[in-house]
Image (cartoon, rainbow, N blue to C red):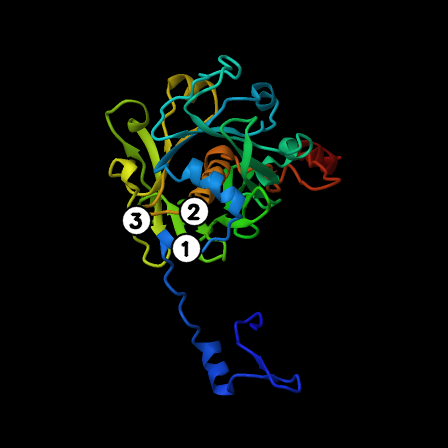
Amino acid sequence: FFNPVGHAYTFLTDGSPRRPPALCMFKFAIEPEPIQAVAVAHAPVTTAVPLTQTMERVLGPCDVVSVQQTPRGCLQEAFGCTARNEFRLYKGFTENMRNGILPGANVETDPQQIGHMLEESPFFPDRCFWSGMRSFSIPITVPDENGEAMMLNEKDFSMPTHCIVHGDSGDIVIPCCCNLPTIKTYTNDRTYVGKTKYVCDQFLCVPKLRTYDANDNPLYLIRPETCCGGCCPVCGSGCDKGSQCIYMPFYLHDYNTMQVLPGAPGGKGLPAQIRNVWAGMKRECCTSADNYFVVFPEGASSALKAALLGSTVLLDFTVFEEKNGGCLVVTWRPPSPEREGGCGGRFWDRENSEGNAQA
């Protein structure tokens, strides 16, 4: 068997373990072997046989999936709380969902919809006081909210991506680099598929995610293209309509080579990516809902496509939803000659002090 640091043990007939030679253990400690290259198109993933059929039927034929967020919870947002996230999944490059801008405007069945995601989390206190750190689960049902549960995305309580400190001289943004948001993807019978984790490194202005397979081997680094030596992200723009006008592509890079992966044949020649796209004037100006195009890598399995849908949810949560760093907003004012802060603080009145001194 293998101990936690990776050494192989065998047992003798008397039950005592036989260890590797000391020289080999010393070499392993100072020169760890590099991670073996991961075959992106054939990564080992454990799936349940009955649900694999559903995943193959729904995600197998898809080279591109449009993830469209439904506007909801306007009153909750107005009072400073966060509404539940709801997404609808469509095959291919679908610009607009059938229900338009307002929930319930057109409630008949959408024949183009292939999946539905609705967040499950308590309103109080999670979405009222610490929305940027809240735990939640988002099941994916097919083809709509009343359909069969295909998979599940879960996030535990975590730190937000950054904190904001309000001061007299302006705001200070402090990144958080521990216990960062992570989404784990499961099939409906709790078989682990993979996870996606927000990454904090020296390039703090470039948001990025790391996706793992079912064996927790890193597969992809998801981030936009950069400039200024990797310090700033680069947006995309064009003169076409809708999603080709203004967009933010997060490309899938092979974790070992850091090369952008080619997209599937149905991706119209685009590299593999998760693209935040312009959702139209009404939705962009009147709501906080976002639209995404997910171009899967060439040869990706259905399980990896399911994990990348979880990556899209985490990208929306960490980059495009929590723009104010969740609930960790601190107000701090430095002490001044006229004011001393802190509990039980006192104010010093210069004029009264001088008058008392003359008296």
Rate crowding at label 2 as few (under 14), some (14 to 19) or many (20 or more) other CA atoms within 10 Å: many
Q: Is residue 293 above or below residue 262?
A: above
Residue identified by numbered label 2: 304
Looking at the figure, which quarter contains the C terminus? top right
Amino acid type assigned to the residue bearing label 1 in the image: Ala
Dot 1 or dot 2, earlier in sequence: 1
Amino acid type assigned to the residue bearing label 3 in the image: Val
Spot occupied by residue 247 in the image (x, y as percentages of width and height): 33, 32
Mark 3 residue element:
loop
Instruction: Write down the quadrant of residue 272 in the picture.
Output: top left
Q: Nearer the viewer, residue 59 or 333?
A: 59
Numbered tag placed on residue 43 in the rendering? 1
Mark 2 and mark 3: span between their CA atoms? 17 Å
Rate crowding at label 3 as few (under 14), some (14 to 19) or many (20 or more) other CA atoms within 10 Å: many
Position of residue 327 in the picture relative to residue 319 (left or right): right
For image coordinates 43% across by 37% down, the residue present is 57
